[in-house]
Image: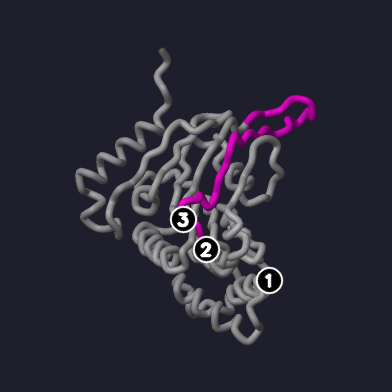
Amino acid sequence: MTESLPLLQVDDLCFAYAATDGLARLPVLTNISLRVAPQEIVAIAGPSGCGKTTLLQLLAGLIPLQRGTIRTTPETISRAGGTWSTLVLQELGLFYWMTTLDNLTVTLRVRGVPKSQRTKQAEELLAEMGLAGFERHFPHQLSGGMRQRLALARGLATAAPLILLDEPFSHLDPGTDERLEEDFLRRARDHKLTVVMVSHDVRRILRMADRVVVMGPRPAGIRGELYIDLERPRQGPLVYSPRFVALEQQVCQLLSPPFAG
């Protein structure tokens, strides 16, 4: 991969939903331009309803472009074998009629993993996600946090070089979320993944991301961005350090509504 090129390049992206009367349009995104470097973790933040999830869906190709371009490096497509991104949504998107194990093996089958290797790879990934012993359970038999971990495991099982996450740890208990964050970050590093994640949790953003991009209210443009130059891992005493607190205040300031002049 050519490190000098962005893995993902978005230029002048605009999007509007059709209103219920079929005539008017509801502008959501306006002139979004974004670069994401290989192996970078970028967090997208902004007010509720500003279009963060819509942006992820556009990046994933789930809804058609209206104006603007989304490009990736040719090396990314080659490495992915055609599946260059995967999206893990808040709604999880699990196959509720399949067991935990089958949710992963079917993903591995679609990816082309030989049948003889699927079960072993799926069991290893479930163990990494803290789901060992629940291979034969169905999603409705799992807690909300366990279903969230299964959704993350399915996203990782695709082996796509770009992972798109929509509030990926929102259903997890405090403490559990930080452990899973570290597990996910370790896997992202080991497998050279690039991550674009949406989160409302400023501390989570500071624990995980290399950079935060802040969107304004709808129709949303990019209000600002901030590089997070903290050493890793970002757990324990670091989250109480003056540097961490200062970055937290800067992100909160970017997220604050502008004063009327």
Q: Of discs 3 and 2, which sits in the foreground?
A: 3
**Label 2 residue SS:** helix
Q: Which mark is residue 152?
A: 2
Magenta-drawn segment: 1-27
- Tell me the residue at 56%/69% (across/down): 157
Alpha-carbon neighbours of circle 2 within 10 Å: few (<14), some, or many (≥20)?
Answer: many
First in sequence, mark 3 or 2: give its number: 3
Residue 213 percent coordinates (x, y) = 45, 40
* Residue at the disc numbered 3: 3
How far is mark 3 from mark 2, CA to CA? 27 Å
First in sequence, mark 2 or 1: give its number: 1
Residue 126 percent coordinates (x, y) = 50, 74
Q: Is residue 64 above or below residue 99?
A: above
Give the amino acid type for the residue marked by disc 2 in the picture: Leu
How far is mark 1 from mark 3, CA to CA? 29 Å
First in sequence, mark 1 or 3: give its number: 3
Residue lying farthest to the bottom in this orientation: 116
Q: Inspect the magenta stretch and tell me whether residue 175 lies in it.
A: no
* Residue at the disc numbered 1: 110
Give the amino acid type for the residue marked by disc 3 in the picture: Glu
Task: Indicate left or right for 134 with 109 as reference.
Answer: left
Q: Is residue 118 above or below residue 65?
A: below
